[in-house]
Every structure is written in C-alpha cells, then in structure tokens.
Image (cartoon, coloured by chain):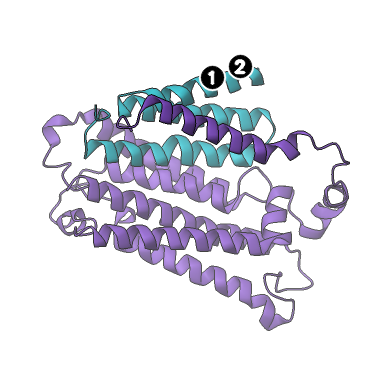
Amino acid sequence: MSARAPSAQVLTAALCIAAASFALWPLANFDGPWPEGIRDYLEARGQDESGARNLVSAIYLGYRGYDTLGETIVLLVAVSGAIGMIGAAGSKLTPGYADAAQGQSPVAGTARRAHRRTELIDVVTGKLGPVVLVFGLYVMLFGHVSPGGGFQGGVVVASGIVFLGMGSKGAGLSPLVGAVTLARIEAAGFLALLLAAGLGIVSGAGFFAPPLRGASPVGYIVALNAVIGLKVGAGIGFLCIAMLGEAER
Amino acid sequence: MIEAMLAAILILSLYAVESKDLLHGTIALSGVSLLSSLLFYVLKAPDVAITEAAVGAGVSTVVYVWAIKSMERSESP
C-alpha cells in the first residue's frame, strides 16, 4: 500500500467515489412511482397463502425459493473453495483434530501456547457456546413466527460452534467442533434441501412447492428453515474451525 | 439518531482503513458491524440485524483476528 505515491491513492479514491456516484445517481434521482403492486399483494395475502407470520420467511422460502437455493449453493462453493485453498497451501487441514483424541484442544497450538492464554477465554466461551447454540436453534425453528429463519439461525449456530471450538480444552471437547462431523452435517443438509425441493415434483405440486396440497404450507417453511439452518451453521462453522486450525500452524 | 449512527459508522470505517495497527482496524470493523446491526434494527429489519450481528461482529472478526495472529500485526512501513 505504502509503496504507491500519495497522489495515486487520492486518484484511486476519487475514481472509486466517481464510480459509486455514477452507480447510485439513478437511484438517488428516482422520482417515478415505487412499485407497489407486489408489496400490497404480499401484505394482503402473504400470510394466508404461506401461513407464516414472518413475511420475510414467507417470501424467501415460499415465493422466492430459487433465491434461497442459490444462496446455499454459493455457501457450498465458498466452503469447497476455502478447503481447496487450505489444501493447496500445502498444509494439513485442521491438524488439531488428530490430536483431539489425545485430549488436546481441537484448535491446534492452543495447548502448546497455553501459557499465553488466560483461563478467561476458555471459561467464558465454553459456557457461552451452548447458550448461543440454543438461541441459534430457536431463531432457526421459529423463523416463521418471529424475526429470523434458516440463514439467520444458521449463522448464530456457527458463532456458537466457534465459541465451543475456542473454549473446549480437551476434556470438555464437543464432537460438534469436529471437522468431519461438521462437513457431514453440511453435506447432509444440502442433500436434504435438494430432496425437500424435489419432493414437490414427485407429488405434482412443482419444484420448491409444498408437497402436500391440502395441508398448511407453514410446515414446509419450518422444515426448510431447519435444513437450511443446519447447512449454513455447519458450513460457516466448518470454515471458521478449519481456519482456526490452519492459522496456528 | 440514525444520522449519529451513520456518522459513527463513517468515522469507524475511516479509522479501520487508516489504522496502522491491523488489530485496531479489525475491532473498528467489528464496531461498524455492530452499529449497522443496531441501525437495521431501528429501521425495522430484525432479520437482517441478526445476520449482521452474527456474521459481521462475530464470525468475521474471529477469522480476521486469527489471520492477524499468524502474521505481522502492523502494516508494513
């Protein structure tokens, strides 16, 4: 960064601001009528049609299921890419996991450098982890009636997994922070999502449609939330745990 | 209220860019995420606020801090 001359930095900043203004100019000076049709339709009928009180959930799992499928694929590709890069960097992935059986911390090197750590981190994160996990599960499973949903709950679960990974010192090691477990949960979550999406084809309702015609579609939204939450939580948690092991090499 | 939060976000972002100590910059970024999450909540988007708090202030900060631990903490002169 500092190799560049200050004038080059100023030029770069000016170019960035100019590009951003160019992109935002039509938005800022938009004086046509806002598109209200879909908004009014969803407000009037979304809750009845989907059965979900949280309209955000109803939209991204009911009306716009394809977007959610795309999001989960993006996450899957990101996780695969990160694992590939860690592998290509010539290091073993999460070297701590082999030592976990011998009672060492899953985060490689934390046992080695124990003298530099305070008990504070272990105690606080180890105790906070399960609480965060439960809150994440709540956000995930009650996404149809309260703010939250699969993705939101999944990232909260992921932070709980990171807490557990940082806080467990051998004895209290949770199998949840094992790389293999997380990878399997993610793969199983994606498979279940594909199956849930394809179930509608078999029953004749269509791709990503609630398979049971007569029943309220809210159960389908809850199931999708749970599957997506597990997948996202395991995926992001796996990424973090893998990096924790890598960086301490 | 919203203007004050936006101003604080701007100040923290500038500090994160300009700070020579990468750890300080990361903490400032975490503060930006926390303030954004509060902003989303005030603007009645609690779903986004949950995601922003968990990803921005939580997970990404952990990843940054761990990356900084394995390299030089300050920006190269």
Q: Quadrant of residue A199?
A: bottom right
Q: Helix, strand, or loop for circle 1?
A: helix
> How far apart in space, not on screen, are marks 2 and 1 (Cα)?
6 Å
- In the depicted structure, whether residue A9 falls above or below residue A181: above
**Tag 2 and tag 1, C-beta contact below 8 Å:** yes
Q: Which lettered chain is shown in cyan?
A: B
Q: Residue at x 12, y 55 (%)?
A: A102
Chain ID of residue with mark 2: B
For residue B56, say whether it is visible.
yes
Where residue A173 appears, x then y in whole percent?
25, 49
Where residue A26 appears, x then y in whole percent?
75, 39
- In the depicted structure, whether residue B13 falls above or below residue A48: above
Which mark is on residue B8?
A: 1
What residue type is disc 2 on?
Ala
Q: Quadrant of residue A207?
A: bottom right
Question: Is residue A105 toward the left or the right of residue A80 in the image?
Answer: left
For residue A137, say whether it is visible.
no
Q: Which lettered chain is shown in purple?
A: A
Q: Residue at x 34, y 24 (%)?
A: B24
User: Which residue is nearer to you in this view: A19 or A24?
Assistant: A19
Chain ID of residue with mark 1: B
Question: Is residue A157 toward the left or the right of residue A109 in the image?
Answer: right
Where residue A97 appears, x then y in whole percent?
21, 57
